[in-house]
Image (cartoon, rainbow, N blue to C red):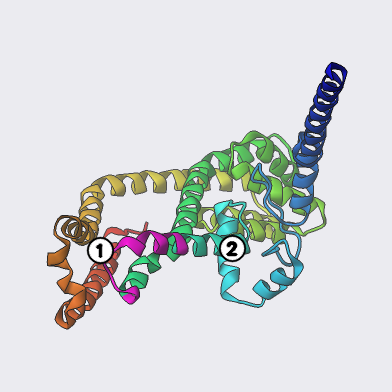
Amino acid sequence: MDLLFYSFTVFLFAAVILLIEGVYLWWSNTHGKAAQRIARRLQVMSGGVGRSGERISILKQRRFSAHDGVDRLLHRITPLHRFDALLLQAGSALTVDRFLGCSLAAFLLALLVSAHWPLPLAPRIILVLPALGVPYFLVRRARARRLHRIEYQLPDAADFIARALRAGHSFTNVLQIVGNELPEPLSSEFRIAREEINYGVPMGEALHNMAARIPLTDLRYLIIAVLIQRESGGNLAEILGNISTIIRSRLKLVAQVRVLSAEGRMSAWILGLLPFAVMLALTLLNPEYVSMLWTDPSGVRLLWYAAGMILFGVVWLRKVIRIRI
């Protein structure tokens, strides 16, 4: 009996060790550093987004899904191309199908949370419908932050390119140097342009692709200056130095305007959120008093009027506080 027990213990221990080793080998082969390097390289070659933020778009179409059938179906829907461009500009690793899945999951989660609200089904769906736009709002916010960082990196990039050109480097080599020396996220965009040129894409097309990925007016000025210089000649280093000075002056003016308009933007946020905060507080403190708004026909009519007035006010406040320079 003791021999049988000891034999079972030894075999069980060996089985556990082999199981752990098998799990480790499977993990290293699928999620290890070597597997990640291969997957990242294949993703970059296919026009996807790598974990380092490097993307390359030498193909005609970016994949909207990992499944071929879903990818073909999503490519037929024209508005989804705008979502793909938004994800590309935000530097997000999400594909279009995952983005749509996140939107649907946010809506279902909000609908599940609202199941405890004392509301009929139709008003409840209307109230949780904005949850569909939560992933869109987050991606837009990530895009704005990324473009903001790139915008503040552009003057240094222009000065860096000008100094490299004065040192005798060719423009294609300058792209590689900028991609290696500057911080993210601008350096990855220059590396993508360099990779596209290496794969045979004309320089003008590669620069236009970079302008499509980074919809900034300052970058378009820089690219237009490079393209005009290649056709007509001139001192590109001096032109880039002047562009760098103009960008810095504009950013300084933008900072001053933001300081002067900070009070107005804060007032707009308070006025926009105040009706929802008051409604939430009344619902929590005295739900019977507020329930007349959706139980009585006059209350429902007032809710629709209030929603229209709030929407008009938000649009108006947004127009007032947005100052374009």
> Where 259 falls versus 69 (above or below)?
above
- Image point (64%, 48%), residue name: 189
Residue, disc 1: 317
Q: Magenta segment: does it hold 117?
A: yes
* Amino acid type of the residue tagged 1 in the rendering: Leu
Furthest residue in direction front, as rendered? 1
- Image point (19%, 57%), residue name: 274
Q: How many marks?
A: 2
> Where 216 falls versus 54 (above or below)?
below
Report whether 176 appears left or right of 264. Answer: right
Residue 225 disc label: none
Counting from the top left corner in percent of width and height, residue 266 is at 23, 50
Tell me where the magenta segment starts and ends, as one range.
108-122
Report whether 212 appears left or right of 40. Answer: left
Residue 62 picture quarter: bottom right
Q: Magenta segment: does it hold 187?
A: no
